């Protein structure tokens, strides 16, 4: 169990990448993104309606590491341009809670009573994935205002947000658009997070970021729009050890 907690605590950012990418997760209905059948970007943008929040619960997450498999039920709560809240549950108990914002990431390990606070700054090499990258994957409506969108042939869009020393590319399939592939690679450190659609139409993510040689897969989950949840990342400092990184 301790090994599983370490893995889930370490790869929370990567788990969050999966939630928007599964083709089974159609953000359909009268809010947010239409059912993913638009044949052009303009048609897609014409169908988009704004939402205040997005809540996905009951996701079946699988983590593969060193020929072992770990399972967890995961939920994610997203407030546009504000925060991601991720919760992982095993055997009915929350074991990991994570919050990701523009300037920091907070990991809460319930079993070991540990909290890690990672603040984004200009010291050292930047990580391959930041809040803005997660948001680009989860909120496809951002495509409508993006200046980085390019069309490759009749059925593929690419958003290239690469910066110095970090390659960042997301590929979308039309009609949709639906995330088909993404690549985040930090050239200085060799850290990467990449994902692609497999033959079963599921997104598989491969990464050596935080945890070496990790493979993740997620499916299922129910979507709710505009639900109000308390984004609580506070803990009792007398019971938890807090580490600032």
Image: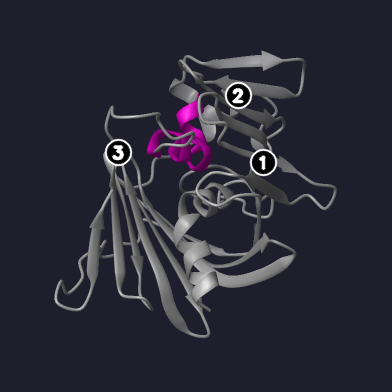
For label 3, the residue is: 102
Circle 3 packing at 10 Å, graded few (<14), some (14-19), many (20+), is: some
Circle 1 packing at 10 Å, graded few (<14), some (14-19), many (20+), is: many
Picture mark count? 3
* Position of 104 relative to 228 (above/below): above
Which span is picked out in magenta? 131-143
* Position of 1 relative to 64 (above/below): below
At horizontal 14% and vertical 77% (from top left) the residue drawn is 238
Going by the image, does 192 lie left or right of 152? left
At horizontal 66% and vertical 15% (from top left) the residue drawn is 151
C-alpha span from label 3 to label 2? 27 Å
Residue 130 spot, x, y in % from top left: 41, 36
C-alpha span from label 2 to label 1? 22 Å
Q: Are marks 2 and 1 in contact (CB under 8 Å)?
A: no
Q: Nearer the viewer, residue 10 or 18?
A: 10
C-alpha span from label 1 to label 3? 23 Å
Circle 2 packing at 10 Å, graded few (<14), some (14-19), many (20+), is: some
For label 2, the residue is: 41
Going by the image, does 6 lie left or right of 24? left
């Amino acid at each position: 169990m301790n090994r599983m907690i370490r893995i889930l605590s370490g790869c929370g950012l990567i788990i969050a990448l999966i939630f928007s990418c599964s083709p089974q997760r159609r953000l359909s209905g009268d809010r947010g993104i239409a059912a993913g059948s638009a044949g052009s970007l303009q048609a897609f943008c014409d169908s988009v309606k704004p939402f205040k929040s997005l809540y996905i619960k009951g996701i079946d997450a699988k983590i593969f590491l060193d020929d072992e498999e770990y399972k967890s039920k995961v939920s994610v709560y997203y407030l546009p341009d504000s925060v991601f809240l991720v919760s992982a549950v095993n055997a009915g108990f929350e074991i990991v809670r994570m919050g990701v914002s523009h300037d920091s990431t907070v990991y809460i390990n319930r079993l070991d009573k540990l909290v890690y606070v990672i603040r984004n700054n200009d010291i050292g090499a930047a990580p391959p994935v930041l809040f803005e990258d997660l948001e680009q994957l989860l909120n496809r409506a951002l495509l409508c205002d993006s200046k980085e969108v390019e069309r490759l042939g009749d059925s593929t869009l690419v958003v290239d947000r690469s910066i110095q020393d970090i390659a960042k590319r997301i590929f979308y399939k039309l009609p949709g658009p639906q995330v088909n592939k993404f690549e985040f690679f930090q050239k200085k450190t060799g850290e990467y997070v990449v994902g692609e659609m497999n033959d079963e139409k599921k997104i598989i993510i491969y990464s050596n970021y935080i945890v070496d040689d990790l493979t993740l897969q997620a499916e299922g989950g129910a979507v709710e729009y505009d639900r109000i949840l308390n984004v609580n990342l506070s803990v009792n400092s007398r019971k938890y050890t807090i580490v600032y990184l």
